Each structure stands twice: as structure tokens, then as C-alpha cells.
Amino acid sequence: MSRSMLRAFVAAGALAALAATARTAAAQSGNINATATVLQPLTVTGVQDLAFGNVYPGVNKTIDYTDASNGGQFSVTGFGGAQVQVSFTLPTALDGPSGATLPIDSWTGYYNQTNSATTGGSAFSSLSGSTTTTLSGTGDLYVFLGARVVPANNQTAGSYTNTVTMTVAYTGL
Amino acid sequence: MRRALGYAAMVLALTAVRARAAAAQARSATVSVTANVGKRALVFGDADLAFGNVFPGVAKTVAPTDAGAGRFHVRLRPGDHVTLVFDLPTQLVGPGGATLPIGSWTGLWNTTNSTAGAAAFTPSSSATTIQIGSGGGAASYVFVGARVSPAATQPAGAYTATITLTGAYAGF
């Protein structure tokens, strides 16, 4: 084999090496992480029913949110100091025997970072929209509800009930 | 690689021709084998994409211009072009195997370590071509943002996932 032919073979070998190198050498990767810390989810608990007790036909009855025994109560726990939005789904009537209904209206409410319906908190200006407030430093909020039932003179006797739903959501602040 | 193979093929042809000529003339000669390969695009992960505290039920977005944006830098020769391909997670993994969806990826790249005047692109598994800066650092910088969407009942805790950026030489 002449030297010139040998050079040709060397060149061919170089080509093969270059091809292999080109396949493997031109790319490289780097990594970073995506990280997030999810805070404590909200827990909403119905603590006490709004209980009107005995109601006379034709006689309206009101339970105030300050009524510790009969007022409706909710509690909320979440991330301390977080801002939340509170809203309600309120019935307009209670359902009774054989489809009878008992109107309910004049809703009132109070929210507080401590478990008191009288001091340190604020009355809801309206229960029909949403209210923005802040959980306590330990992540607590207490809500108290009152309302009025309006029985007719011929209101059917029996037990009436319906559901009050309070929804609480973080605002992200 | 195509460019490199092209160079190598030309070199091989040239070598064969010169070899025949050399044999006929019985004289020695030399050739050089050159190719523009082996330039490795070095990719460095500089900063995590950090969402910080996230409230359950509240989506949170980190923009590429935000302090929490993820950042890479890519080194090669000044003026070289580099294709970027991302391997992006669809969720972060947290306590007990809980998952946190992540998406809506956004990106910026620049020949300086600044988002001012940077070019926008969408990070994805499809290649995006950038150019290496001509400054002394011979680097370009890549900034990444995204959005996490926690459920209202998302378990509390730390969540994480890996973002991989692969850079490949794409010519000068």
C-alpha cells in the first residue's frame, strides 16, 4: 500500500471519527427546579344550627346572631393572617310537612377572629354578596348568623328545615 | 452535525484526489482534516423557578421578569446559534405523592443577564434558536416563568419538579 493510499485510509478513518463525534458532542443539558410551598387548606365547619325552636302561626320570630344557644355558628381554620372571602347561600324558606314552606328573611351576621359574637368583630353589611376579611394570626375565623321566620296564620304545624351554606376562599393575599 | 459531515465529506474527496495525484507524481504531500464539530453548548441552571407560598384554590403565576423566575445560561462561542429544547414538568410533586399542576410556560432570552430588551419565546419540547452573546462572557441567558394551579383542597407542603434545558450547537 502506497503512502498516498494510506493517507486516504487515514482520512476515511478521520471522517468516521468526526461523524461519531458530531452525533454526540454538540448538546448538553442543565437543570433547575420548580418549587412551591402550598399553605394550609381552609376548613369550614358548621358548629351550630340556627334554631328557631317553637314558632306560633302568625307570629314572626327572630333569632339574633348574638344568641349563643340558638344562633347559627360556623368556624374557619386556615393559614394564619391570610385574607379570605366569605359568601353565603341562604334559603328563602324552610321546608316542612307535605311540602309546606316557612319563609325566612332578615338575615344578619357577625364575623370575628375570636369566638365571640359580641366584641372584637364586625357585623356583615350584607349577606347577599361576598365579604373580605382576614384570618387571625393562628388562622381562625368565627361567623355567627341570625334571621327571622315569618309563619302564616294557617301555617301547617310540624318541623321545618333548610340548609345554610357558607363558602370561604383564599384571595391569595 | 450536517455541516460537519459536509466538511468531512469534502475533505475525504479532496484527500482521495490528492492521493491519486501524489501517487502519480511520487511526491509526498500532506492534507489537513478539519471540521466544525465538537462545540459543546454548555447549559447551566442558575436559579430555580420559585413560586413561594401558594394558597389552595388560588392559581399563582411567576413571570420571566419576576424575582422568582427560573434562569439558565448557555455558553458557546460569541455569535454561535444554539437550539434550546425544554423538558418541562406538568406537575410538581409534594407530600404523600400529591401533585400540583403547572403550565402556561413563558420565556425570555437575552445576550446579557437581564430581562430588559429580552426576546420572548414559549418554552417547549420544540426547538427555539438563540444566539450567543458577543460580550466577554460568551453566553446567553434564558428566563422561565409558569403558573401553578392548586386545588382548594391541595395538601399543604413543599412541592418540586425538575426543568431540563438542552442546548445544541446550531451553526454560526
Image: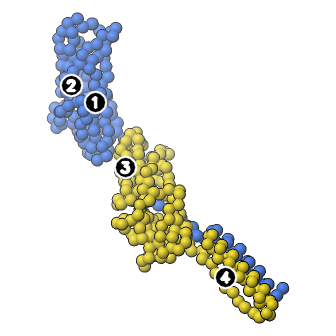
Chain colours: A blue, B yellow
Q: Which mark's residue is nearer the viewer, 1 or 4?
A: 4
Per the model, the C-alpha gap separating discs 2 and 1 is: 11 Å
Quick one: which residue is furthest to the top in this view? A154
What is the x, y in percent for residue B140? 44, 70
The residue wearing badge 1 is: A88
Which of the pair B151/B146 is nearer the observer? Answer: B146
Mark 1 crowdedness (10 Å alpha carbons): few <14, some 14-19, many ≥20: some
Chain letter belonging to callout 3: B
Q: Pointer 3: residues within 10 angstroms few (<14), some, or many (20+)?
A: some
Which structural element holds mark 4?
Answer: loop
Q: Kindly identify which chain the residue marked by label 1 belongs to.
A: A
Q: Give amino acid for label 3.
A: Lys
Report helix, strand or loop for mark 1: strand
Please report whichever mark, 4 or 3, sits nearer to the chain's N-terminal start.
Answer: 4
- The three-letter amino acid code for the residue at tag 4 is Val
**Which one is closest to the eye, mark 4 or mark 3?**
4
- Asked if labels 2 and 4 share a chain, the reply is no
Residue A94 pos. (x, y %)? 29, 16
Query: Which numbered disc covers residue B60?
Result: 3
* Image height of B116 relative to A93, above or below: below
Residue B33: image tag: 4
Viewed as shown, does residue A22 lie left or right of B63? right
Q: Are marks 3 and 2 on the same chain?
A: no
Instruction: Report if the CB atoms under discs 3 and 2 are less than 8 Å apart.
Output: no
Q: Quadrant of residue A153?
A: top left
What residue is at 77 percent from the left and 94 percent from the top? B27
Residue located beneath label 2 in the image: A107
Viewer-nearest residue: B35 or B57: B35
Q: Residue at x 41, y 53 (%)?
A: B146
